[in-house]
């Protein structure tokens, strides 16, 4: 019996060839896209991973103020660590210099001569982050250079071309990539790769030393090391070892760094010299006072003798005058006063003498007492000076200790430390496509479930048409399992063949290579060999028929549970929903609504297909809206023309510049650690109209940060300083519009205090025009033009993906809608034929059976558009979790209106095609359905 039933499979396929062929093509398309996306992801994941091992990708890197000495390097190597010196120099090409070079035809650059580009020069590497050549050889000889592949491509450079760097001409002998610049960001704070504006290059050691000696680089040489741990320790352990290496001042050659050290040492020396002068002054005072008091006894004796002689002379005169009184040192004044009272009136001459003697002796007594007080005072002063000298010496000793503690000139040599997992340049392509891989696997199952459910609707329609035959077979003893197996054969076969075809196409160059094109054009990857993971082959070939079997087994099995008599009589299954009260609707509207209720399964399938198609469409439109919003808002939010990032700031910001202070901290989101730029600004900053709080723990964040990390006002934001292993917790005070990267804002003085900087410290200068700043003082210079060019990268990169998603969504929606509405029409073939007998014209039949679907599509679109938008907006942040940008996904009413009108247009196209199907239904159909 099973063999007999199997013959009917081919008849079913022939009679509904277009239906199954369309589904076959959809399955092929779906599996082609899914397999090619996952295959491209696996090719990049495995290929880049293998290349990283072959080219010995670093375990991490760190920067220092001065190169490590031989003893320090040897100490690390003895502990099992492998180090690679990766010093580099940046050179600017293009602009006015580039124009002059092009006149001489020395640099070989092409493309946009008005733009400045930058090349980062390394010496050839020997142990870590080795270059993977796409073509050519390494730069082993003098005058040879190897360029990063995308920079070379963007400028039309090939082997044998000449390029001028630092005024010297180099011959291009190799083009390739390195694992530490998988994503060739110029700076770690960049949000996109600009291959035209920046690239890396490699020369031999002699040429590198020559370029360094000539000093024509755009900024000072950067001292960077890469390391391999070789299982000897953890990253944090290595970091602590390096932090113990103290900076040797004698090795510092950077004049700007020396200037900073000299300024700091000048302050220290001034303090110490002042304290020394204080000590010396107190010692001199003590010595002088000690010299004075040496003669104090002689002075005191002489004063006493003068007073005693004067007193004796007065006593002698009194005796000569016959006065029986002897004056004493203690009572002379009283005694003389008594004599004046007694003899002054009687003898005027004697009275005058006595008064004069009294006056002279009182003056001498006062002088004597004054000398005594002076002598006692000098002794006290000497003792005080001794104490002052001792205190000054103690103060100097204490001050020396404080100065030594505060003015630590044994600098930590480490400028930054970055393990590989925190390096956004390394493995960026893997992180990017890893999302595609898991999203592709899930999307494949969802889309395949939709397609197989559509097939099940066809099968159920066939079962309903063949009810009498199935009833007869039941009567002859055929088991339900046999019929279920029979009706599963075609869906499983179609999906199996579609899966094979889609998988084969996905693995072909038109599949994986096409899907990798965006990644290959954006990331700097080595030559990759296409990968054919066994699980993906099984997924592409086995998953579709398995899904088809599961879906159809339950759906078909339920339809075949009806009794044989019911099937023989072609009885239609009754559903209470078809009998609902429709109110006082007109005949046409009532009929159309009843028709939709009768075909509820197909109608829901159309809605489900619309929802799936809209999810795909929303993915593409979200990509476009995000890219476009970022491009437009970058121009609107960037008020300055130039941003100068200082490595060695001057005491005062240059005239015409606005001083700011920036720290780069980390924040984790969706499993990725992203840079957040914390910018300290004044309240009257002309380039940021932001009201910042003066509190250290209150922060104003950009809406990019708010959307990326899902923050609102009042939330707590914790940022991490990886170098110092410190967390900073802030309360979000306000959210402001700013889209250029992930920025948060603090009051400038509050931020200086928070990070322990001086009151006038700055490391960022903003300006509305170019400033004459020595490049040697700078880390980087970013212009508004650079930001605008960077924002264009997103939209250029996303354009192919947007077109693919929109096209796939439209195709899926049109095909599913066409097939389902066609099934609805075919199921009504008997009624349509009967209406033709009753004299209804094709236009009237179209109005009753086709035009009613307009409301299904119109209302379904109203529900599915916002629902699919909400679902995709919830999913989209995970798809761009490794991108340091805000999430701006709001649609304008024009986009919503365009999507809605596009859905209705697809319906109208389908409707016109299905009108021809009505013409093929003849009145004779009624005679074929007799009981």
Image (cartoon, helix red, strand yellow):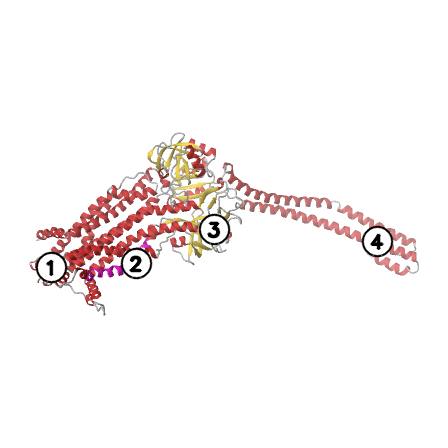
Magenta: main secondary structure equals helix
Specify the label residue 361 is tagged with. Answer: 4
Q: Position of residue 257 (x, y in %)?
A: 51, 40
Which secondary structure lies at badge 4? helix
Q: Residue furthest left?
A: 476
Distance in Å between CA atoms under marks 3 and 4: 86 Å
Q: Which residue is mark 1?
A: 925
**Location of residue 742 with respect to 159 vertically, above or below:** below
Residue 194 visible, this orientation: yes
Which secondary structure lies at badge 2? helix
Please tell me whether mark 3 or mark 1 is closer to you in this view: 1
Q: Position of residue 224 (x, y in %)?
A: 43, 39
Distance in Å between CA atoms under marks 2 and 4: 118 Å
Q: Which residue is mark 2?
A: 867
Q: Is residue 148 left or right of residue 760?
A: left
Residue 427 placement: quadrant: top left
Please tell me whether mark 3 or mark 4 is closer to you in this view: 3
**Crowding near the residue tagged with mark 1, few <14, some 14–19, many ≥20 C-alpha atoms within 10 Å:** some
**Crowding near the residue tagged with mark 2, few <14, some 14–19, many ≥20 C-alpha atoms within 10 Å:** some
The quadrant the C terminus occupies is: bottom left
Residue 337 counted in the magenta span: no
**Crowding near the residue tagged with mark 3, few <14, some 14–19, many ≥20 C-alpha atoms within 10 Å:** some
Q: Position of residue 651 (x, y in %)?
A: 54, 45
Distance in Å between CA atoms under marks 4 and 1: 159 Å
Distance in Å between CA atoms under marks 2 and 1: 42 Å
Q: As rendered, which of 897 and 223 lies closer to the eye?
A: 897
Question: If you read the primary sequence from the N terminus, does the residue marked by circle 3 or circle 1 appear first?
Answer: 3
Please tell me whether mark 2 or mark 4 is closer to you in this view: 2
Please tell me whether mark 2 or mark 3 is closer to you in this view: 3
Question: If you read the primary sequence from the N terminus, does the residue marked by circle 2 or circle 1 appear first?
Answer: 2
Question: If you read the primary sequence from the N terminus, does the residue marked by circle 3 or circle 4 appear first?
Answer: 4
Question: If you read the primary sequence from the N terminus, does the residue marked by circle 4 or circle 1 appear first?
Answer: 4
């Amino acid at each position: 019996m099973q063999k007999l039933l199997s013959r009917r499979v081919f008849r079913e396929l022939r009679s509904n060839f277009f239906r199954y062929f369309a589904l076959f093509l959809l399955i092929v398309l779906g599996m082609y896209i899914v397999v090619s996306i996952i295959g491209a992801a696996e090719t990049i994941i495995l290929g880049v991973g293998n290349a990283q091992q072959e080219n010995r990708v670093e375990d991490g890197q760190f920067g220092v103020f001065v190169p490590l000495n031989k003893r320090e390097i040897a100490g690390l190597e003895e502990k099992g660590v492998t180090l690679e010196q990766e010093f580099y120099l940046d050179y600017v090409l293009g602009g006015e210099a580039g124009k002059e070079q092009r006149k001489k035809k020395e640099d070989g650059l092409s493309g946009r001569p008005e733009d400045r580009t930058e090349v980062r020069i390394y010496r050839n590497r020997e142990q870590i982050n080795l270059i993977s050549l796409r073509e050519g050889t390494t730069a082993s000889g003098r005058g040879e250079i190897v360029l990063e592949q995308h920079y070379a491509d963007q400028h039309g450079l090939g082997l044998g071309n000449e390029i001028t760097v630092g005024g010297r001409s180099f011959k291009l002998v190799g083009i390739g990539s390195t694992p530490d610049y998988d994503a060739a960001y110029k700076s770690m704070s960049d949000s996109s790769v600009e291959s035209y504006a920046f690239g890396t290059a490699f020369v031999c050691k002699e040429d590198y030393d020559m370029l360094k000696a000539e000093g024509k680089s755009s900024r000072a040489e950067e001292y960077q090391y890469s390391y391999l741990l070789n299982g000897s320790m953890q990253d944090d352990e290595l970091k602590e070892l390096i932090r113990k290496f103290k900076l040797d001042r004698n090795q510092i050659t950077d004049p700007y760094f020396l200037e900073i050290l000299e300024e700091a040492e000048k302050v220290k020396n001034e303090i110490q010299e002042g304290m020394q002068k204080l000590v010396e002054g107190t010692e001199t005072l003590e010595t002088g006072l000690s010299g004075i008091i040496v003669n104090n006894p002689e002075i005191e004796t002489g004063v006493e003798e003068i007073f005693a002689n004067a007193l004796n002379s007065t006593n002698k005169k009194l005796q000569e005058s016959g006065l029986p009184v002897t004056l004493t040192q203690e009572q002379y004044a009283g005694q003389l006063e008594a004599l004046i009272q007694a003899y002054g009136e009687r003898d005027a001459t004697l009275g005058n003498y006595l008064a004069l003697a009294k006056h002279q002796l009182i003056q001498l007594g006062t002088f004597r007492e004054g000398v005594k007080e002076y002598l006692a005072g000098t002794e006290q002063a000497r003792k005080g000076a001794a104490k002052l000298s001792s205190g000054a010496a103690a103060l100097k000793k204490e001050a020396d200790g404080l100065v030594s503690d505060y003015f630590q000139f044994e600098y930590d040599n480490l400028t930054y430390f970055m393990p590989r997992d925190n390096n956004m340049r390394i493995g960026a392509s893997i992180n990017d496509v890893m999302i595609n891989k898991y999203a592709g696997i899930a999307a494949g199952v969802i889309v395949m479930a939709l397609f197989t459910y559509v097939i099940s609707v066809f099968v159920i329609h066939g079962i309903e048409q063949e009810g009498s035959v199935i009833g007869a077979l039941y009567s002859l003893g055929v088991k339900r399992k046999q019929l279920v197996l029979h009706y599963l054969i075609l869906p499983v076969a179609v999906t199996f063949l579609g899966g094979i075809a889609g998988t084969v196409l996905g693995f072909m160059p038109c599949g994986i290579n096409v899907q990798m094109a965006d990644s290959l054009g954006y990331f700097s990857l080595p030559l990759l060999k296409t990968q054919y993971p066994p699980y993906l082959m099984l997924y592409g070939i086995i998953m579709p028929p398995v899904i088809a079997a599961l879906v159809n087994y339950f759906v078909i099995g339920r339809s075949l549970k009806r009794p044989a008599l019911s099937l023989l009589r072609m009885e239609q299954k009754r559903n209470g929903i078809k009998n609902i009260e429709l109110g006082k609707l007109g005949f046409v509207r009532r009929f159309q609504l009843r028709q939709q209720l009768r075909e509820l399964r197909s109608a829901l399938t159309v809605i489900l297909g619309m929802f799936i198609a809209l999810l795909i469409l929303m993915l593409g439109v979200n990509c476009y809206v995000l890219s476009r919003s970022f491009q437009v808002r970058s121009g609107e939010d960037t008020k300055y023309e130039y941003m100068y990032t200082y490595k060695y700031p001057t005491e005062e910001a240059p005239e015409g510049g606005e001083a700011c202070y920036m720290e780069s901290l980390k924040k984790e989101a969706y499993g990725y650690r992203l840079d957040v730029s914390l910018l300290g600004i004044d309240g009257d900053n002309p380039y940021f109209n932001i009201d910042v709080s003066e509190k250290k723990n209150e922060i104003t964040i950009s809406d990019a940060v708010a959307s990326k990390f899902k923050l609102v006002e009042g939330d707590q934001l914790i940022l991490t300083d990886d170098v110092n292993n410190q967390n900073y917790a802030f309360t979000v005070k306000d959210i402001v519009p700013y889209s250029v990267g992930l920025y948060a804002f603090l009051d400038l003085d509050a931020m200086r205090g928070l990070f322990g900087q001086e009151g006038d410290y700055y490391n960022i200068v903003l300006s509305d025009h170019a400033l004459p700043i020595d490049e040697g003082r700078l880390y980087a210079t970013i212009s508004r033009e650079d930001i605008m060019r960077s924002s264009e990268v997103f939209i250029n990169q996303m354009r192919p993906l947007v077109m693919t998603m929109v096209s796939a969504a439209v195709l899926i929606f049109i095909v599913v809608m066409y097939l389902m509405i066609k099934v609805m029409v075919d199921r009504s073939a008997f009624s349509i034929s009967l209406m033709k007998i009753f004299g209804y014209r094709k236009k009237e039949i179209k109005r009753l059976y086709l035009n009613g679907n307009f409301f299904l599509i119109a209302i379904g679109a109203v529900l599915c558009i916002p629902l699919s938008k909400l679902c995709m907006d919830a999913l989209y942040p995970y798809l761009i979790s490794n991108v340091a940008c805000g999430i701006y996904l709001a649609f304008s009413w024009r986009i919503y209106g365009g999507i809605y009108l596009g859905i209705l247009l697809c319906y109208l196209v389908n409707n016109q095609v299905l009108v021809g199907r009505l013409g093929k239904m003849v009145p004779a159909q009624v005679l074929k359905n007799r009981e």
